[in-house]
Amino acid sequence: MAKTEPIPGTSDIFPAETHGWRYLEQCAHEVFSKYGFGELRTPIFERTEVFLKSIGDETDIVQKEMYSFEDRGGRNLTLRPEGTASVLRALANLGISQGDEQKVYYIGPMFRGERPAAGRKRQFHQIGLECVGKIAPLIDVESIAMLMDYIKTIGITNTKLLINTRGIKSERGDAENALKAHFEKNIDSMCTDCQRRVSTNVWRILDCKEDDCQAYVENAPMIADMIGDESKSYFAEVLKGLDDLSIDYELDPRLVRGLDYYEHTVFEVIYEGIGAQNAIAGGGRYKIEPPGCKAPFSGVGFALGIERLLLTRADLGIENEGETITDIYLVSLGEAALSMNLKIAHNLRQEGKVIQMNLEDRGIKSQMRSANKSKAKECYILGENEIEKNIIIIKDMDTSEQTEVPLEQFLEG
Ligand code: HAM
C-alpha cells in the first residue's frame, strides 16, 4: 500500500463527492426539523465507560471493534462507535430525567474496527435521531415514520422495513430460557463466540453471521410468542400505528440487532442491491443508564449509514444534486487586466455569482482551456485593447457568440 493512502476502512471524500454528502445532510436537517427535532453535536471521543455499559459487554462492538486508548492523563477513552450512548450521556448531563421529552438528531463520523468491505468501513458516518424520555408505542411509530419520510425524501425506493420486538427485560425470561435450551443442545457444533454466548448473552446468537450457527438460528424458538402481555400489547399497538399510516413492514422474528440496550421495538431498513452490507438503517426502543445516573432513560431512535445511502442512490441511478456551477470565467491578458479582473470578480461574487479566474499571467489559449474545463456559462475577456476602449468582451460558452459591454458597470462598488 502506498504511504499516502488513508488507512484501510477510511476514505478521503473529494469535492466531487461531497455534494452528495451535503445533500443527504441538508435533507436530514429539513425532514427532522418538520417533526420538531433539533441537532445535537457530541464529541467524537468519550470515556470508554459511556459505551461499555450501554452497548453491552457481549456485543461485537464492545468485544472486538472499539478504538480505545489511554490519553496522557491516564483516562481510558474510545472513539465513538455509535451515537446513542453519547446522546444519552449528553442529555443526562443536562440534569433531565425520564419524563422530560428530548428530541434530537445528529450527523457525524463513527468508528468500528470491522473488516473493511463494500459498505463496511472503519470510519463511517451516521445520520441518527433519538427521542428520549417518554415511552409510548406511537412515539416508536413516529420515529419509523420519520425514518421512512427521510428515505423517501432522498429518493430511495425499493426498501424493506423489517420489524420485531425484544420485549421488556422483566418479560423476557421465558424466551431467554427457551433460547438457551435450544442452543445448548447444539452447542458443540456452533462457533466459539456462540458457545460462550449461550451462558453470557444468548440473544446475541440470533445475530450471529457464522455459517456454522445459521441452521440453529433458523430453528430457534420465536421470541415474540414467548414474551409477556405488556410487551405483546405494546408491539401490537406499534404495528397498528404503522398500518394506520400505511407504512409497509415485514415481521422478522429473528431480528434482535447488534446492541444490547434495546427493549420493545427493533427495526432495520434493508436495500437489496448494495451487496452483503444491505442494512441502510437500524434502530429501536432502548433503555440506557448513562454513567453517574441513578435511573435509566427510555428512548427510541435510529441511525442511517451515509456511505450505504450513497451506494443505494448510485444503484438507483440517482445523480447527486447541488454541484456548484461556475457562472463566469474571467480571462485576463496582461497585468493591468488581471488586477482589474480581481476587482470585477470581487464585485460579481458580492452579487452571488460563482466566478473563477486565473491569477497567474498566462496566455489566452491556456486560460480558455481552463474556462472550458470549469464549465462556465460565460467567459469575460479583458486585455489592454479592451481597457483602452473601456469595454469587456462577454463570450457565451454555448454559442461562442461575443458581445462588447461597457467596463465601468463591473468596476463600481
Ligand atoms: P447500527 O445498526 O449499529 O445501529 O448502525 C446503524 C447504521 O449505520 C447501519 O444500518 C448502517 O447503515 C450503518 N453502519 C453501521 N456500521 C457500519 C460500518 N462499519 N460501515 C458503514 N456503515 C455502517 C446503531 O448504531 C444504533 N445507535 C442506532 C440507534 C439509534 N438505535 C437507537 N437509536
Image: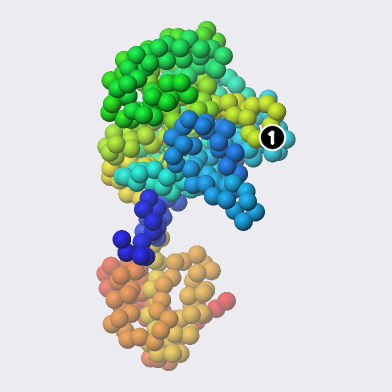
| Residue 387 x %, y % | 43, 89
> Which residue bears the numbered disc 1?
292
Q: Which residue is drawn at 28% across and 20% down?
A: 215
Does label 1 point to a residue whose CB lies under 8 Å from ligand 1? no
The residue closer to the viewer here, 389 or 345, is 345
Q: Is residue 156 left or right of residue 229?
A: left
Q: Is mark 1 on a helix, strand or loop?
A: loop
Residue 391 visible here: no
Q: Which residue is drawn at 39% across and 43% down?
A: 114
Please tell me in which quadrant of the rendered image residue 96 appears: top right
Label 1: few (<14), some or many (≥20) within 10 Å?
few
Q: Residue at x 29, y 76 (%)?
A: 369
* Percent of width and height locating residue 42: 59, 46
Q: Quadrant of the N terminus?
A: bottom left
Quadrant containing the C terminus is: bottom right
Q: In this view, does 110 lie above or below 178?
A: below
Q: Quadrant of residue 206?
A: top left
Query: In x, y percent, where is residue 58?
Result: 48, 30
Ligand 1 occupies quarter: top left
> Measuring 40% from the left and 67% from the top, which residue is drawn there?
327
Front position in the image: 213 or 389: 213
Seen as rendered, the residue at the extreme front is 188
- Give coordinates of residue 151: x percent, y percent: 41, 36
Q: In which quarter of the image is residue 288?
A: top right
Outermost residue toward the right? Answer: 95
Q: Is residue 360 left or right of residue 296?
A: left
Q: Is residue 33 left or right of residue 270?
A: right
Amino acid of disc 1 = Gly
Q: Is residue 370 above or below residue 61?
A: below
Q: Nearer the viewer, residue 156 or 393?
A: 156
